[in-house]
Every structure is written in structure tokens, then in C-alpha cells.
Image (spheres, helix red, strand yellow):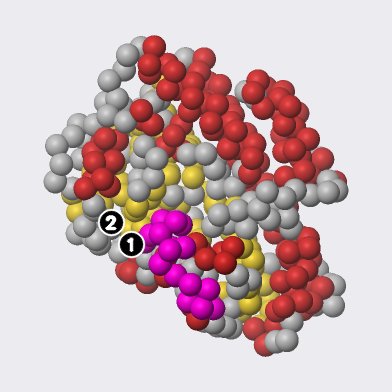
């Protein structure tokens, strides 16, 4: 059996695909979630599991009649996009730096936003629902428009990769930007206020939740779906720009047809059917891996990444890991490593080599191969990629 059952006493069991012993604070966090009365069947922990807020990053939580906004987190709809191009790796020779500079010029990173708003963004149909969103974000519509098609910061990235067949892939990682963050914060705060008023006895205040059928639940669910769509479209807009840059450098500006397109969330919640029942499934740092679902599992910028296909494992609620998972916090990584270490660990990758991205050094992440070994019952590998260019947010 590839997963093991944690030895804890809680209302629901916890099944873990991690091959490392969980630390005490991680076990406690899993136990807190499993002790909630509305958790359905069990909690599933993915191989890259690590500490989060309220719930572990890398946990899959199926619930009946309730949802925990802090378990979805503040980067609603964060996820990955990838396309397989028809080009072979030799076409990239001598062009990587120019491609990187073009990407940095075309796609805003960090807190930056687009100066001009392109037509596909203004035409996005979901703007018509903006006025229905939480009152606290009503002054943010123009910012949300300008940020659509921007990367953000932290571990968000844009990469050119090459697979074992020498085929070129384009890959990126991003979410719902400032608007998703703000929506999440408003709803998390409402949930906490409700818990306080009702004097709900929670093992952790970040597990404050909404009960279905209440106006608060309906409002959160509506905003959540909107932000998830925003995040997905954000990746599409960036990918279209990224594709144009590659066409310019590798195809003389001629459009190419991707051989495969994948766009998947890894911080989100959806209504799904599991074990014959309708449930809400929250994947906090996990990817849906139903039979034939394509997913993307990136390693750190000095490691491999994987395109996978789901096996539909029911015990994991048809899920798999979303990456390598951090070994150490950003602060710890900055103290433990130097700029020389970064240069050494990103050899052969065209990327910024400065202290601004020291917290993203490959050594701060778990070995991705180990994570993949642990989920052979969850996914099959379709392609193994190695990044040759990386733009960090």
C-alpha cells in the first residue's frame, strides 16, 4: 500500500502519501482538519506535504455541507499552464537570453501590472459579474484588469523546458493576483467573525468555515468560482504572449499549433462526486488526477518537471502532488545559502542570478524524483522536462 494511515485520534482518518515522517506541528495540523465534523471519509496528504495556514499544503479535503476558505488559501486558483511545441531543442541555441529579455518585457512580474490592456482582457465575459463580488473589492476592477496577464511574485515562474525527446515546452505558474488575494482575505475574516460570534470550538481559528445554505457560503462560493476563472484566464493570456515570443524566435513569427495544452489549478475548490456522494473538494497544493486528466508537477528551477496523466485513484480523491514542496522556509533559505550557491545550483539555466531570488534556490525544495516515486499509484508520467530558461516572479 503506497499510502499510510497516520496514527492519530480524530473523527476522520488521515491517509498520507508522504515518504517522510511528519513533524509534530504538521501532524497536529492534519489532526485539526480531520477532527472537523463535516470532513468526508478521510483527509488525503500528498507526497509534497508541508506546513500551511490552517491546513497543510499538499492536502485534499473533501467536505459535506461546509467549506473552509483558509484551506483554499489566498492565492485562489493558483496553478500551472504548459504547452508542447513542435520545435526541437537545437532551435533554442544562442537565443535563450533574448527570449528571456522579451518575456520580461512582455509579462509583468512581482507587483507590476500591464500598462496597456489588450482586447482579449477587456472582452473577458466574467467582467460582467464583477459587480456581484464582495463589496470590499468594488474599487479594484481597473487594477484587476491591468493585472490580468501578469505573473506575480514568490514561486511563480515562466519557463522554457526541453523533454527527454528534445521537444521544447512552454510552462508557467501563476494565480489570481491581487484580486484573488483580497477576496480570500475578506471571506476568511468573515468566517472567523462568524466562528467567534457562534463561539465555535475550533482546533485552529484558520479552520473557520461556512455552512452550505447560508448567505455567507453562497457569497464565498460565487467569489471563489469567479477568482478561479480569473486565475485560469490569467495563465491563458500570459501563455498567448509567451507563445508569440517563441514564434518570433523559433518560427520567424509564424503561428504554431501546440501538440498538447494543459491548464490546471492546484489551490482551489470544486463540487465533485466521490464514493457515490456529492462533496466539496478543496485541493490545497494538489492537482486533480481523475483518469485521463493531464496535470503538471514542477520541480525547483534546477530540477526536472513532469507532465502527468491521472490514474483516478479514489483514495486520494483523484488527486496528486502539485510540485516538489519546500524543504525550508524562504527566510531560512536566505540564511542558509549564498549567491554562489544559487549560481552553482542553476548551472545551465538561463535565469536571473541575484539575491532577489535566493529564497527560490533549488536546495530549498524537496527532491522531485522522490515525490514522483511516492505517487506512482496516482499518476503516470507523460513527459519529463528540464528547464533551460526561467523567469521568476
Q: Quick check: 14 above or below 99?
A: above
Q: Is disc 1 surrounded by few (<14), some (14 to 19) or many (20+) residues within 10 Å? A: some
Residue 104 in picture, x, y percent from top left: 73, 64
Q: Residues within 10 Å of mark 2 (few under 14, many from 20)?
A: many
Q: Residue 227 location, x and y as percent?
A: 61, 37
- Image quadrant in which you'd find residue 378: bottom left
Residue 371, by quadrant, is bottom left
Residue ID for mark 2: 17
Quarter of the rendering occupied by the N terminus: bottom left
Q: Main secondary structure of the magenta part?
A: helix
Residue 324 numbered tag: none
Residue 49, above or below 168: above
Instruction: Tell me residue 242's x, y (percent).
Output: 73, 64
Q: Residue at x 48, y 28 (%)?
A: 188
Q: Quickly name the residue at label 1.
A: 375
Answer whether labels 1 and 2 touch (C-beta < 8 Å). yes
Residue beneath the point at 19% across and 54% down: 4
Q: Which residues are magenta?
A: 326-343
Q: Is residue 255 visible?
A: yes
Depth check, front residue: 348 or 299 = 348
The answer to whether one can see residue 82 in this image is: no
Q: Is residue 32 magenta?
A: no
Viewer-closest of 278 and 57: 57
Amino acid at each position: 500500500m503506497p499510502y499510510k494511515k497516520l496514527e492519530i485520534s480524530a473523527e476522520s482518518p488521515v491517509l498520507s502519501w508522504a515518504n517522510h515522517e511528519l513533524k509534530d506541528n504538521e501532524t497536529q495540523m492534519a489532526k485539526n482538519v480531520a477532527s472537523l465534523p463535516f470532513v468526508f471519509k478521510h483527509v488525503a496528504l500528498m507526497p509534497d506535504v508541508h506546513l500551511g495556514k490552517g491546513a497543510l499544503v499538499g492536502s485534499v479535503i473533501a467536505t459535506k455541507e461546509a467549506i473552509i476558505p483558509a484551506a483554499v488559501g489566498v492565492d485562489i486558483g493558483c496553478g500551472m499552464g504548459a504547452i508542447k511545441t513542435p520545435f526541437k531543442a537545437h532551435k533554442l541555441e544562442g537565443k535563450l537570453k533574448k527570449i528571456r529579455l522579451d518575456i520580461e518585457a512582455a509579462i509583468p512580474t512581482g507587483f507590476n501590472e500591464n500598462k496597456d490592456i489588450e482586447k482579449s482582457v477587456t472582452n473577458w465575459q466574467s467582467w460582467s459579474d464583477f459587480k456581484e463580488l464582495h463589496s470590499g473589492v468594488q474599487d479594484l476592477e481597473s487594477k484587476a484588469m491591468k493585472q490580468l496577464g501578469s505573473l506575480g511574485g514568490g514561486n511563480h515562474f515562466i519557463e522554457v523546458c526541453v523533454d527527454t525527446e528534445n521537444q521544447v515546452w512552454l510552462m508557467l505558474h501563476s494565480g489570481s493576483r491581487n484580486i484573488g488575494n483580497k477576496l480570500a482575505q475578506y471571506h476568511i475574516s468573515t468566517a472567523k467573525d462568524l466562528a467567534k460570534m457562534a463561539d465555535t470550538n475550533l482546533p485552529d481559528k484558520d479552520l473557520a468555515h461556512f455552512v452550505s445554505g447560508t448567505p455567507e457560503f453562497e457569497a464565498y462560493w460565487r467569489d471563489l468560482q469567479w477568482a478561479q476563472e480569473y486565475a485560469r484566464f490569467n495563465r491563458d493570456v500570459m501563455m498567448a504572449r509567451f507563445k508569440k515570443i517563441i514564434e518570433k524566435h523559433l518560427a520567424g513569427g509564424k503561428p504554431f499549433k501546440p501538440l498538447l495544452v494543459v491548464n490546471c489549478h492546484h489551490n482551489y475548490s470544486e463540487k465533485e462526486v466521490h464514493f457515490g456522494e456529492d462533496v466539496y473538494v478543496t485541493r490545497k497544493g494538489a492537482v486533480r488526477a481523475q483518469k485521463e486528466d493531464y496535470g503538471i508537477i514542477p520541480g525547483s528551477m534546477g530540477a526536472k518537471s513532469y507532465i502527468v496523466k491521472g490514474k483516478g485513484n479514489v483514495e486520494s480523491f483523484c488527486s496528486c502532488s502539485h510540485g516538489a514542496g519546500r524543504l525550508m522556509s524562504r527566510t531560512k533559505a536566505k540564511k542558509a545559502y549564498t549567491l554562489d550557491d544559487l549560481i552553482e545550483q542553476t548551472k545551465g539555466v538561463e535565469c536571473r542570478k541575484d539575491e532577489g531570488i535566493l529564497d527560490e534556490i533549488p536546495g530549498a525544495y524537496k527532491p522531485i524524483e522522490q515525490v514522483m516515486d511516492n505517487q506512482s499509484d496516482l499518476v503516470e508520467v507523460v513527459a519529463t522536462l528540464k528547464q533551460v530558461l526561467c523567469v521568476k516572479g
